[in-house]
Amino acid sequence: MRMVLLFLATVLTVVDNASAQAAMMANSDVERRVESLLAQLTADEKIGLLGGVNFFDVPGLPRLGIPQLGTADSPFGVRAT
């Protein structure tokens, strides 16, 4: 029984380590994409992203394939209407 537990602990450690490495790789891919998109934005487009549309939404940028982002704020938590 002890060997089985040791084996399972080893397997879980290896799997956890592999998923952490995959997450780090995914994060670096995201970081590269964000940096690439930021480099392509004009100053006016960057300023435009600071404002909102439709009360709580962030405007999208079709030129770069960035969709409009819906957000919400409420004392009762996030709700969709």
Image (cartoon, rainbow, N blue to C red):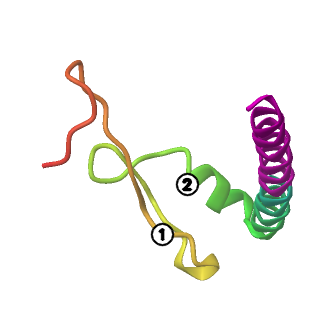
| Quadrant holding the N terminus | top right
Q: Which quadrant would residue 61 be assigned to in this image?
A: bottom right
Q: Nearer the viewer, residue 51 or 27?
A: 27
Q: Which quadrant would residue 13 be assigned to in this image?
A: top right
- Where is residue 46 drawn, in percent x and y? 66, 54
Residue 68 placement, left or right of 42? left
Assess disc 2: are there few (<14), some (14-19) or many (≥20) residues with their C-alpha within 10 Å of its C-alpha: some
Residue 48: give its label.
Answer: 2
Residue found at x 56% / y 70%: 66
Q: Main secondary structure of the magenta part?
A: helix
Q: Which quadrant would residue 74 be assigned to in this image?
A: top left
Give the vertical position of 46 relative to 78 (above or below).
below
Residue 58 placement, left or right of 73? right
Q: Which residues are magenta?
A: 1-24
Q: Earlier in the sequence, mark 1 or mark 2?
A: 2
Assess disc 1: are there few (<14), some (14-19) or many (≥20) residues with their C-alpha within 10 Å of its C-alpha: few
Residue found at x 81% / y 55%: 31
- Where is residue 21 drawn, in percent x and y? 87, 51
> Furthest-top residue in view?
75
Residue found at x 79% / y 36%: 9
Q: Nearer the viewer, residue 79 or 69?
A: 79
| Marks 1/2: CA–CA distance | 14 Å
Disc 1 versus disc 2: nearer the observer: 1
Residue type highlighted by circle 1: Pro
* Element carrying mark 1: loop
Residue 67: give its label.
Answer: 1
* Element carrying mark 2: helix
- Where is residue 57 drawn, in percent x and y? 37, 50
Residue found at x 31% / y 30%: 73
